[in-house]
Amino acid sequence: MDECVSASSLVVLRVCFGVALSVEALRYVLNDWVQSHLVGPTFYFTYPGLGWVAPASVPVMNTVIGVLVVLGALLASGWRTRWVATASLVCWGYIFAIDRALYLNHHYLVLNLLVLWCLMPRVRRRGSVRFVWVGGVRALLLVVYVWAGVSKLDADWAAGIPVAMGTGGLRVLPWIGSFLVSRPFVVATSWALIVIEIGAPVWLGLRRTRPWAMAAFASFHVATAFFYDIGIFPWLSLALLSTWLSPAWAGSRRAVSDELDPGQDSGWRRRLLLVFLLVHMIAPVRALLVGGNLAWNGGAQLASWRLLTAQKTGWCRFEIVEVDTGERQGISPLYELTVWQAGKLARNPEMMLTYARHLARRGQASGAGPVQVFARSGVSLNGRVPAPVFNVQMNLVPELTQEGRAPLVAARHVLPLATGPAVESVRLPDGWWEANMWGAAAILQQVARADQSGDEPAAREMTTLLPLVEEMSLSEATGSALALLRFGLRAEASEMLERPAHPHEDLCPLMLRVEEALSKLGEGELGERALRRCAAEARSPLALGKLADRAIATGDIVDAQRWLELMVIEVPGALEPSLKLAELYAKYLNRPHEARRLLDAAALRQPAHPRVLEVRRVLDRLTATPSGDF
């Protein structure tokens, strides 16, 4: 390891790394991430022990980003690389420590490479360097490959699901598109990646296999750059891969003449390098200790190099219950979190617990008594049907009121994944994530606010999300139906009225109220459907009566007879249904004897009731067989 080799390969890596850092910093400016990710949020998912890290003002943060652009360029130029790398490490470390929701694997790789450059001696194109530094960079890449391969040893990857989801767009390619997305090819590619990544120390270590391995890895990195939105990660990986070429591959053909500077390459720096690499190799082991499906329960995601194994889409909403009063309040994370934070929250059980504790603390700080926090969620892992992360009846903050208690270990409380790999991935419609993260109640509040401010486009946009909400109460569904009708979405409104009622909801009062509202809107057909549901599921006499009146008014004698007969059965002592049915029998169905029987039974209960006398006169006139008064 003390052998001296050309530093030219490290020079190329340094240039590529510096340029990548400048590009990454510029992305914060071009995408307005300083405002949306760093300064804009009102709540941050801080790392343990780093709760004191907070963003500065927008001008200061913009200055930091500008400094990072310059530092990247200086690192690429080779000017005082240790000092520049140290300053970059401090600045990037500060940026990434602000919010755990910002964690990405390429951010972690950036920090690791900056640590290496803080220790590494100055490298020049025609200079020399001890092989330990080239070997350190190579070892870093091997750790990434091996642990990435280990993380792929699960059923989903073995079935080719993540690869199929990422490369499905290749189907449109002429001639070979159908082959590239065929199941045999996708499964073979998945297993080939496992073998290549886990065996990377062998394939790259042996001279005979190294060219083939480098070609395979380079192809993989280029492919991921086009199929996945993972920032600078593929390009950094390609730069690291280049160090497996001869150390002098980018140098001059002349012999290396510069001698080593002992002050630039002291022994303690090399020892720190070995310690750093050892820690880096061991850190991902903790993922194996968590157990279960790590892609699902989110255990040990940080610094574990779990790459491309889990494509998760999901939503999460919370409900706060005051223990003393039983009052319930639904909370959508989008009221407080940014879209980016909410998306990460829905896919990370530990962040769900963190936010639940925050909601409980905020509620108690406002003067409320002890509270419980529950979560409703639906997360799709690698194309599965969305499933809940936590039991909806599990209080997420049982020990919150006692300060100093250790937080809940999220992975131990996550519901097990009930289904195996999806045969075909679920294609969730556009807007599904946003709709379910908001929830029906929150969307309707947004619609009401937009209406009050006269912002009809915003109201319409939010309303169109309502049909995508999977979990909503029947009360929310009826309100959603009316909102949809306001913008002419009649088919969607009709589907809303078929949503199931929750166990604690009384179906008929809701259906009767919405029927009245629909009648005022001129939606008689939908109103009748609401009444029919009430009559079918709960046999409500009021609904049956309204249906009978509708049928009589429209001349639908068959339906009128059906609803009135059900009313007589459901409420045998009711006077009006019996009299209406008697009139129906006599006027339209030519069944005078049954009409007389119903009238006589009603007369026994209330012989002098005006309606009894009225119906008796009608029957006497129709049958022409008058009878004596009672």
Image (cartoon, rainbow, N blue to C red):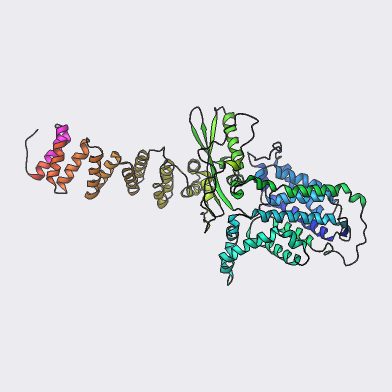
For the question of whether residue 216 can be seen, the reply is yes
Q: Residue at x 66, y 47 (%)?
A: 287
Q: Quadrant of residue 246?
A: bottom right
* Count of marks, rendered view: 0
Extreme residue in the bottom direction: 175
Residue 475 image offset from top left, x and y in percent: 42, 40
| Up/down of 429 relative to 43, above or below | below
Question: Which sits in the foreground, 130 or 527?
Answer: 130
Quadrant where the N terminus is found in the figure: bottom right
Residue 458 horizontal side relative to residue 247, left or right? left
Is residue 605 one of those drawn in magenta? yes
Point out residue 130 in the picture as x, y percentages from the top left corner: 87, 56
Which of 293/134 is in front? 293
Q: Position of residue 573 (x, y in %)?
A: 22, 35
Position in image of residue 41 (x %, y %): 63, 41
Q: Which of 288/421 is in front? A: 288
Please say whether residue 28 is one of the residues in the magenta stretch: no
Quadrant the C terminus occupies:
top left
- Residue 209 located left or right of residue 468: right
Residues shaded magenta: 602-617
Q: Main secondary structure of the magenta part?
A: helix
Please indicate, yes or no, whether residue 181 appears anywhere in the rendered image. Answer: no
- The image quadrant that residue 154 belongs to is bottom right
